[in-house]
Amino acid sequence: MDIWQWVHDIDPELRRGGHVRLADLIRRIPAATVDDHHDRVDALAPEALALAKAAGLPWVEVFVRHWHLQSRVLHRCQGDMALGEAVALVDYAHGEAARGCPQAVCTVQDLAACYSQVDGPGWARERADVSRETLARIDPTWPCFTCISCEYAGALREQGDPQASLDFLDAQQKQLVTAGLGRERTSLLPERISCLIALGRTDDALAACEDAIANGRRDESQRRARQIDLARIYARLGRGEDALRHLPVPTDILPTPSHYEPYTDALVHLVRLGARPNDVELGRLLQRFIARLQLNGSHRLPFDIAAAAADLAIQRGSPEVAALHLAAMKRLAARLNRPGSAPERLAAIRLSLETALAAPRDERPDDPEERLRRRLAADGSADPSEHARLHAVALLQLGFAREAADLLERHVDAHPEDDDAVQLLEMAYRDGEDDDRHRALGERLLASPDPAKQRHGRWVCARRHARARDWDAANRLLEQLAADPADALAARLAHVSNARQQADWPTLLRLVDEALALQPDLPPGAHDWDRMVAATLLGAWDRVRHSAARLAMEIEGEGPIDLRWELCRIRLEHPNGKRQDLYAARTGPVTARLLQISRIDQPQRLFDQVVFDARPLGSIDDGDGQPVYLYAEVEPLHRAGYRAFSIDGVHPGEAVLGDLRRVVQAHRGSFQVQSGDAYRLTSPAGEERPGLYAFAAFAPDTDLRVASDALAAVVAGLADPLVWPELAAAAGDDARTEQHRELARAWAL
């Protein structure tokens, strides 16, 4: 069964049965997964699962749990921490309750992939066996055929035989072609690229990567993966500038650990090429990769990245950092299913480390890694508390939160009165996302007979609850703290941050007002921006102007603010979970009016006035050296209600294009061309033509029949077609709708 056909078929059934929210979620969760929006998956999946259980829909339950595992395992590389759920889902999907479920086979892939994250090479033999058994029960018409094929090919490659993997992929591609499904071959390309790189066939890998970019999946995760592959390939070809141009920035890939290993490979080759410095920032980044993977219960991947990080640390003269990586590698090696080459790699790094420690080194007084070396060499007997704190700070600055926490725990056990060390210990737990030890610290402080330690414990617990998004528990503690004059201001400002995450605008506005009443000379800051968001949404324009003035933005007048400020971009999220960045005109401190036609398969956002979070997500150059900032939409303030439609066909020339634009504008609409010179069409006779793909959006009170007729008059004399079947259908013109659909089919529009 085609799983996506099943989703398409069950959607109306769910809606007719009153399960509208569940129907939305089973589309949004896969979309968020493949676009690397994993925080959103974690937020939506429990809700969808509860709805599926309540409705008594086991197939939907399997679907939701499978896609949550896809996010957790295939994208975030969760190994041990997801293994229990992966095993349980295989049992459930193949049990009586879910008998016949079309995604039962997919749960086998989830489990195999989970073992791959724990120790890819160590479990490769078993993964190959289960994949081979599964492939024997399906054929190329199954959507999971390519997924299981890639799982088997990956297992062969991780057993050290990339050529066998490549041969197998060739055979699977032939099966797809024989079944008339040759277009599905693109799903095999990512694994093919990995095999070709492993075989040293770099030019072939480049061709496969370009094929995948042109013809493969275009979701965010795959787009980033192919950009990383390009960087790996170009670095191997000695094309450093090309590699750097394609390599995503670290912030784009940090939420998705499946990118870490190939990204590290690209960085190592760029350093080797001399195209990227081997510096402290590189070391910090790799340590973030290692720490995240360890936290996720992966063992082989962080072992491999730690080996690369240790080599790089030795090369840049920081053997103390390499020693930390070596210690991590030893811990990880003990948890591998099969050691493979791990003992030899450990021995090689140990030998290199001994040589580096014995070699003379230059002084680097401002280098964080040098500060760690000095701290290790210092005599801490005179002031053991200061020594422990400085050592921990040096570790934290380099990203070694777990190591800092271990050190501080030993110190605090021996010196429980060292409150500064306890504060650092909490920081280490937070940085290392060590929730269990963070919880234990808060509970221990709350249980102390010392009121000062109890107060500290409330802060620790409030921060931990906020990190876990348990807002009610966090806010109760902050309200207790706010009753103490010593914490009245800080607790309110911390509560403001929580209220912003909760979109609790009345509470946020009240808290900032109270904070300003407590301290009228409170320096302006993020709380003022948050206050303006809340006040705008609540219509409290006097408070918007007050906070704007505190931030040196004098806005005259009273009532709603709708000004003509600079150009910006707004990132919005559509009901289907897809994000889109659109140009907008800023109309106030935290408002903007959208100027671009948005996706036409979703409710139209053109000319909507929105409230945005003023913390920039990034910027681009406007061409004149001025930044155009990108902001995230918070909520719509005013919906314009426009409707948008596509116009597709052969490019009619600039003169007719201008006429089309004028017709749309005359009907209070907006006409925006989406295609470029690369858009080409082939006529039914096989002749190539330049194409045009555009959007036309109209105000809610526009007579669409009149607008459609006016467009038809413009193109009436053209030899080649331009069509707008959706607009014609919305206008109630059945004859034109059918005519345009027939032309679209004939021209493959």
Image (tube, rainbow, N blue to C red):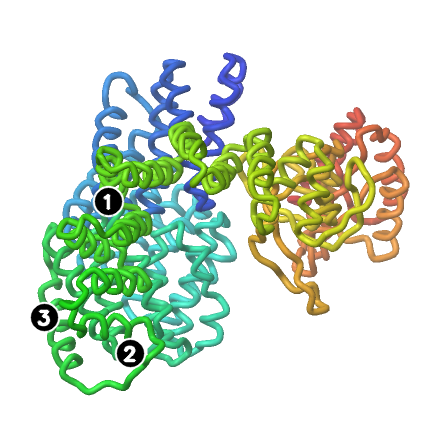
Local SS, label 3: helix
Q: Which mark is residue 516?
A: none
Q: Of the numbered discs in the image, which one, if any, rests on residue 316? A: 2
Amino acid tagged 2: Arg
Mark sitting earlier along the chain (2/3): 2
Q: Are marks 1 and 3 in contact (CB under 8 Å)?
A: no
336 lies left or right of 558: left
Q: Secondary structure at mark 1?
A: loop
Above/below status of 275 relative to 71? below
Picture disc at residue 79 = 1
Q: 536 or 644: which is nearer to us?
A: 536
In the image, 244 versus 195, the foreground residue is 244
Q: Which one is in front, 21 or 316?
A: 316
Give the x, y percent position of residue 69: 32, 37
Image position of 709 (left or right of 106) = right
The amino acid type found where label 1 is placed reads: Gly
The answer to whether residue 180 is seen in the rendering is: no
Say which element carries label 2: loop
Q: Which is nearer the N-term, disc 1 or disc 3?
A: 1
Q: Which residue corresponds to the image point at 38% horizontal and 50% vertical from the top-left?
A: 256
Q: Residue at x 21, y 49 (%)?
A: 417
Q: Between residues 29 and 718, which one lies in front from this camera angle?
A: 29
Amino acid type, label 3? Ala
Q: Quadrant of the N terminus?
A: top left
What separation in Å lies between label 2 and label 1 (alpha carbons)? 32 Å
Q: Is residue 27 left or right of residue 386?
A: right
Q: Residue at position x 59%, y 29% from top?
A: 506
Q: Position of residue 669 (x, y in %)?
A: 83, 40
**The C terminus, quarter of image:** top right
Instruction: List x then y, in percent, for residue 743.
Output: 72, 39
The residue singled out by tag 3 in the image is 347
